[in-house]
Amino acid sequence: MGITNFFSRLFGGDAPEEPATDEQVEQVAQEQSIAPEKVGPTGEYDQSGVAKRVAIAFDQNPDTENFDRLWVAQTASTVVLKGEVPTQDDLNMLVGIASAVKGATDVNTDEVTVG
């Protein structure tokens, strides 16, 4: 396995060099009456906003570099992980990272196979 680049693999293109911070996401959400999960990586309205910001969070964490068979999506404010991870500890780590992203209210792992 090589190094995973979640953002480009899942959404095409490069992630922004300076993605929106949690504070910026909250500010944009309030100022523009956008749900936090719909705020994109640079503060714009985006249907897949929280999924894209989770992908960036995964890319920024060196412990997530070998998950080529994992995908990130969202349903409303729930982050949906799909695919395969080697261990339950890996999945727990990914859930923790995803849960910490502003706008994510839950993480669904029903479609993840461990092992």
Image: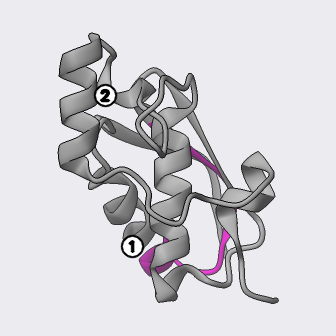
Residue nearer the viewer, 33 or 2: 33
Residue 83 location, quadrant = bottom right
Task: Name the residue nearer the viewer: 112 or 4.
Answer: 4
Residue at 36% over, 50% down: 20
Residue 68 image offset from top left, x and y in percent? 76, 72
Q: x, y (%) of residue 97?
A: 36, 64
- Residue lying at 71% horizontally and 77% vertically, measured from the top left: 4
**Residue type beneath disc 2:** Pro
Would residue 11 appear left or right of 31 to someone viewing this image? right
Numbered circle sitting on residue 93: 1
Residue bounds of the magenta highlight: 79-91
Mark 1 residue type: Met
| Residue 36: assigned label | 2
Quick check: is 77 in the magenta stretch? no
Question: In x, y percent, where is residue 6?
Answer: 67, 63
Q: Kindly state the secondary structure of the residue where label 2 is placed.
A: helix
Q: Residues within 10 Å of mark 1 (few under 14, many from 20)?
A: few
Q: Which mark is residue 49?
A: none
Give whichever of discs 1 and 2 has the lower sequence position: 2
Spatial CA span between label 1 and label 2:
23 Å
Q: How many marks?
A: 2
Residue 89 sits inside the magenta stretch: yes
49 lies left or right of 8: left
User: Which quarter of the image is occupied by the C terminus?
Assistant: bottom right
Q: Secondary structure at mark 1?
A: helix
- The reply, left or right, for residue 74 in relation to residue 98 is right
Q: Residue furthest top?
A: 33
Q: Residues within 10 Å of mark 2 (few under 14, many from 20)?
A: many
